[in-house]
Amino acid sequence: MDIKKSLGLAIKQSRNAKKITQEDFSGISSRTYISTLERGLYSPTVEKIDAIAKVIGIHPLTLLTLSYLVEINETDPTSLLNQVQVELSQLFP
């Protein structure tokens, strides 16, 4: 699965988990745009990912982490988050 589709599924899963409708994004985007993102047809900007995450009530990194978990068909974030922690510590020793 490509990352656009994974991100779309992550948006949809997190939106549904928080009981948020596509219409609830009207302050930042149209329902049609959110639907298009959820189907993996568009790639949102970083600013749009940030805005979407705020509406859902999660950190943008949570949304991106979920996207990569969807992509690798994994539900446990431990390994992925450990990798991020190691890489960040290497960048900022």
Image: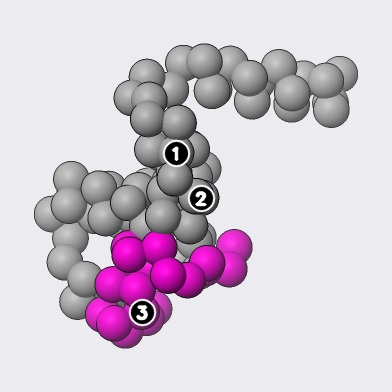
Q: Quadrant of residue 32?
A: bottom left
Task: Give x and y (percent) for residue 29.
Answer: 37, 81
Q: Nearer the viewer, residue 74 or 59?
A: 74
Q: Which residue is mark 1?
A: 71
Magenta residues span: 28-46
Q: Which residue is mark 2?
A: 3
Q: Secondary structure at mark 1?
A: helix
Q: Is residue 39 magenta?
A: yes
Q: Which mark is residue 33?
A: 3
Q: CA distance from mark 1 to mark 2?
A: 6 Å
Number of numbered discs visible in the structure rendering: 3
Q: Is residue 34 magenta?
A: yes
| Residue occupying image coordinates x 41% and y 55% | 5
Give above or below for 81 relative to 13: above
Q: Is residue 72 visible?
A: yes
Along the polypeptide, which appears first: circle 1 or circle 3?
3
